[in-house]
Amino acid sequence: MTAFPLSQAISSLTDKLKQLKFQSHSDPIIQVSVPISAMPAIAWLAAQPIYPRIYWKGRDTEEEVAAIGSCKDFTYEEAVDDNQLSLEYQKQRALSNNQDIRYYGGVAFDRTTECWPEFGRAHFVLPRIELRRSGEEYKLLINLNCESNEPEAERALAIEALAKLVSPRPLPPPNKINLLSRSDRPDRYHWTELVKKVTHEKFIQDTPKVVLSRLTQLEVDEEVDPWMLLACWQGRNQNSFQFGFQFSPERAFISCTPERLYRRRQRELFTEALAGTTTRGLNQEEDRALAQQLLEDNKNSHENQLVKEHIVDALTPLSNYVGAEETPRVFKLSHIQHLHRSIRAELKPGIDDFQLLQALHPTPAVGGLPKEPAMNFIRQREGYARGWYAGACGYFNKYESEFAVAIRSALIEPGRINLFAGAGIVSGSEPEAEWVELENKLTTILSILTEL
């Protein structure tokens, strides 16, 4: 099919919507699409006057999505029972058999504690309009929700949304910010105290791993474009998941994270153990030496092994088969490298995404082991609300889903940039070395924002 320039794609979609005949027996969620000429997805997204704005790019797939508006939205700001979430999830999945219908969103790191405004403890959106790229092919899609609205009202809303679309504009240049101040929570003193508590022999006997994290707040006196920041970050870490959620002009959460929570296609599931970290070398020889040291380091190998065992144990009741790599490999990013093991499972019939989220999230790579005592320690001692940092972000539909763990991430607010980093604390962890690891994990984003 011929790919249209944006203006013609809008006209073609509008004509299709005007001619659309609503059938009483058809799915309540309807999607219409046309092929469209190639365009830069993030620049297109940043130019649109409609919220929410959502961006998703898989780590190892030739797929990219920019989405705007909402024709269906479910969010939970207050405490929510897992059964409620499960029922809502099943209800959404039942609304369409079209495998192109997708809900994008996320689940907070800890659904029992206070959440960020707008993001909630869980928030998923069926966008009004999507620009999707698969390899070299682009499509413009529009979704109609005839479950909540009358079909004619939905038709009018969809045509109105299309009329508001504008062409992509160049993103602003990546200028260095004027940094007014920086604060860390926990600060260095409290970090040292926390690591000592976790590594104390009495504590670690029962809780062999706690992933402690730190919030770094940068106070600024200028507006920071989250999409420019994500585009720059994307250029530095191309073998990562890249995504962003901006539910209003006030705040945006962006992430360039290496870690997959899981990818599901029908009953086939792919996940991984990503834990254990070192820096990159200044040259190939030094880089190889650091990678070898990481593979041979007992503390990091033990940490990765714990994560692998937990994931396999969590998936076993839900699966006919679970297989994991026996030995870890090195996964390289621009400034750091991790230990990585691939894990594959064949799910039992009827197992759904919500059961997978319950079983796998948060992983020991961001929470700890055993899960509950580690989570309790984080709730009581860490000193800030993680929100969607270390949460699960991605998309789902009836046939497939993919979620990433939002570890390399930033929350952009007026006058403030919030950065997050964590480190797995196990037997043998040293406070100073773990603090340096936090700094290493922020190197890429800080190098974009400030003069290092």
Image (cartoon, rainbow, N blue to C red):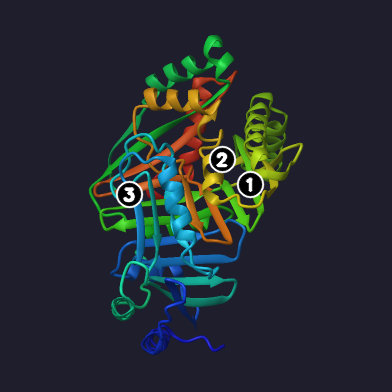
Residue at image location 52% in from the left, 44% down from the top: 357
Q: CA distance from mark 2 to mark 1?
A: 10 Å
Q: Amino acid at mark 1?
A: Thr
Residue at image location 30% in from the left, 64% down from the top: 51
Give the left or right position of residue 239, taking residue 85 as reference.
right
Answer with mark 2 or mark 3, whichever residue precedes in sequence.
2
Q: CA distance from mark 2 to mark 3?
A: 28 Å
Q: Amino acid at mark 3?
A: Ile
In contact (CB < 8 Å): disc 2 and disc 1: yes
Answer with mark 2 or mark 1, whichever residue precedes in sequence.
1
Q: Residues within 10 Å of mark 3 (few under 14, many from 20)?
A: many
Secondary structure of the residue carrying numbered label 3:
strand
Residue 447 showing in the rendered view: no
Q: Where in the figure is residue 79, as x and y percent of width and height?
A: 34, 39
Question: Which residue is farthest right?
Answer: 326
Q: Where in the figure is residue 384, as x and y percent of width and height?
A: 34, 31
In contact (CB < 8 Å): disc 1 and disc 3: no
Residue 412 image label = 3
Relative depth, front residue between 267 and 340: 267
Q: Where in the figure is residue 132, as x and y percent of width and height?
A: 49, 71
Secondary structure of the residue carrying numbered label 1:
strand
Q: Amino acid at mark 2?
A: Leu
The vertical placement of 16 against 185, above or below, is: below
Relative depth, front residue between 67 and 253: 67
Quickly name the residue at label 1: 271
Residue at image location 35% in from the left, 59% down from the top: 73
Question: Which residue is farthest front?
Answer: 25
Answer with mark 1 or mark 3, whichever residue precedes in sequence.
1
Q: Where in the figure is residue 146, as x and y percent of width and height?
A: 37, 72
Give the left or right position of residue 236, taking residue 67 as reference.
right
Residue 360 image label = 2
